Image (cartoon, rainbow, N blue to C red):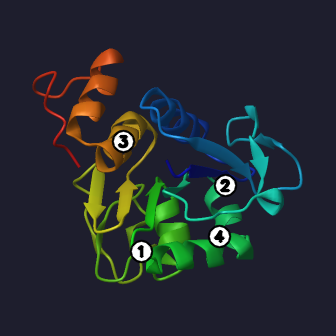
């Protein structure tokens, strides 16, 4: 199975990054955390230091399943400022089966500034909507799927964001199993048609 990658920059939102990694691994999806810095140790927006699995410069991104961007500031700005990641995101967006997920500030600060949300519905952290260039902003929704891109609005919805990624990769049944195992329910334990 293809690998997904969660990108860590100094100042990333810890709960958004680690929730996604945890949920994808529970679902059996291969996922690696990637430091875009010169060190495997990356400190998040709230002073939590995480040891990434790999360094960007030492990693081949051969047909990744998902490229996933946590938010946080200055994490999202640091992701955008890293030119190699810009190119990787642009290639992934153009790929026939390339998928991208971003949450919090990253849909606006990274994807919006790269023009990857043009003509798409998307959500982001409240107050960043004007940076989602060409997107139809949906501040009323926690998670939005439009084509090959999933966007989420912020830390409190990290679990739902992660489960939507699982649902899109493996189906409603697996997302339901993972969510139910974590005691996360919608209207009923089997209702995982969100997003």
Indicate whether 78 appears above or below 186. Answer: below
- Tell me, for residue 80, which label it has, or none: 4
Asked whether 48 or 69 is in front, the reply is: 69
Give whichever of discs 4 and 3 has the lower sequence position. 4
Depth check, mark 1 against mark 4: the one in front is 4
Q: Residue at x 44, y 57 (%)?
A: 101
Q: Earlier in the sequence, mark 4 or mark 2?
A: 2
The quarter of the picture where residue 148 lies is: bottom left
Element marked by disc 4: helix
Q: Position of residue 91 (x, y in %)?
A: 55, 78
| In this rendering, position of residue 194 left or right of residue 161 | left
Q: Is residue 195 left or right of residue 153?
A: left
Mark nearer the viewer, 4 or 3: 3
Question: Which numbered disc, 2 or 1, marks the residue that appears first in the sequence?
Answer: 2
Residue picked out by circle 1: 132
The front one of 73 and 79 is 79
Q: Residues within 10 Å of mark 4 (few under 14, many from 20)?
A: some
Q: Secondary structure at mark 3?
A: helix
Query: Residue 75 bears which disc, if any?
Result: 2
Number of marks drawn: 4
**Residue at coordinates 38% horizontally, 51% vertically from top-left?**
153
Residue at 49% x, 47% y is 1
Of pointers 3 and 1, the one earlier in the residue sequence: 1
Vertical arrangement, residue 45 with respect to residue 100, above or below: above
Q: CA distance from mark 3 to mark 1?
A: 25 Å
The residue lying toward the viewer, choosing from 84 and 137, is: 84
Which numbered dot is residue 34? Answer: none
Question: Residue 188, how many percent across, how many down?
Answer: 11, 23
């Amino acid at each position: 199975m293809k690998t997904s990658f969660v990108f860590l920059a100094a100042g990333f939102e810890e709960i958004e990054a680690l929730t996604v990694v945890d949920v994808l691994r529970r679902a059996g999806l291969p996922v690696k955390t990637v430091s875009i810095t010169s060190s495997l140790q990356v400190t998040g927006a709230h002073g939590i230091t995480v040891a990434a699995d790999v360094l960007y410069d030492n990693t081949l991104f051969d047909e990744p399943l998902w490229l996933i961007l946590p938010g946080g500031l200055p994490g999202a700005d640091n992701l955008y400022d890293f030119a190699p990641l810009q190119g990787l995101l642009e290639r992934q967006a153009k790929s026939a089966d390339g998928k991208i997920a971003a949450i919090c500030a990253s849909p606006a600060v990274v994807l919006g500034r790269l023009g990857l949300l043009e003509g798409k519905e998307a959500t982001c952290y409240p107050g960043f909507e004007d940076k989602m260039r060409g997107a139809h902003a949906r501040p009323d929704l926690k998670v939005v799927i439009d084509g090959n891109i999933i966007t989420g609005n912020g830390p409190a919805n990290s679990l739902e964001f992660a489960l939507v990624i699982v649902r899109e990769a493996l189906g409603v049944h697996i997302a339901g199993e993972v969510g139910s195992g974590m005691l996360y329910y919608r209207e009923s334990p089997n209702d995982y048609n969100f997003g």
